[in-house]
Image (cartoon, helix red, strand yellow):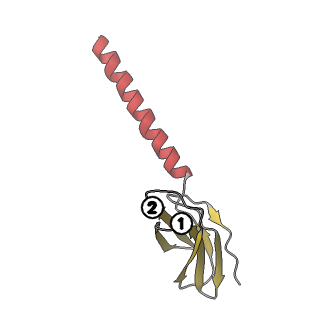
């Protein structure tokens, strides 16, 4: 009977850990936040900052009536430098200006210019 209590307790702990990780991942966009966002015609323009030696990747995916955008910055190993570099990603989107969101559903302020 005691073993059953340990097994049930262990399963509850594992379930709590998995649920906590899921909540954390759903509350975060899966990457960094963009510094800026705007539409130039049917092209979405996303601005971001990064440091020297960092690896930057962006992703944009049309999803029905909105666009999902994601930024990942892999920080360079070594000393931290006080230099901020800026970058910009431009993606043509058929259907023109529409709502832009992070993968978790958080909305970006992305006006048309």
Mark 2 falls on what kind of element? loop
Q: Quadrant of residue 81?
A: bottom right
Where in the figure is residue 30, as x and y percent of width and height?
A: 49, 57
Q: Which mark is residue 39?
A: none
Where in the figure is residue 63, as x and y percent of width and height?
A: 51, 72
- Residue 112 vs 100, above or below: the answer is below
Residue at 42 percent of width and 39 percent of height:
18
Badge 1 density bin: few <14, some 14–19, many ≥20, Cα 10 Å: some
From the image, which quarter does the C terminus lie in? bottom right
* Left or right, 57 with reference to 33: left
Mark 1 lies on residue: 51
Give yes or no for contact between labels 2 and 1 (Cβ–Cβ under 8 Å): yes
Q: Which mark is residue 76?
A: 2
Residue at 30 percent of width and 17 percent of height:
4
Mark 1 falls on what kind of element? loop
Where in the figure is residue 33, as x and y percent of width and height?
A: 59, 62
- Residue 15 vs 99, above or below: the answer is above
From the image, which quarter does the N terminus lie in? top left
Which sits in the foreground, 4 or 60? 60
* Left or right, 51 with reference to 74: right
Query: Disc 2 and disc 1: Cα gap in Å?
Result: 8 Å
């Amino acid at each position: 009977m005691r073993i059953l209590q340990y097994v049930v307790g262990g399963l509850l702990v594992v379930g709590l850990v998995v649920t906590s990780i899921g909540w954390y991942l759903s509350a975060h966009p899966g990457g960094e936040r963009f510094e800026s966002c705007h539409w130039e015609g049917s092209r979405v323009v996303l601005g971001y900052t990064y440091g020297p030696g960092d690896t930057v990747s962006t992703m944009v995916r049309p999803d029905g009536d909105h666009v999902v955008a994601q930024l990942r910055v892999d920080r360079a190993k070594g000393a931290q430098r006080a230099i901020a570099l800026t970058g910009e990603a431009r993606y043509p989107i058929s259907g023109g200006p529409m709502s832009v969101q992070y993968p978790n559903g958080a909305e970006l302020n992305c006006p048309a210019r």
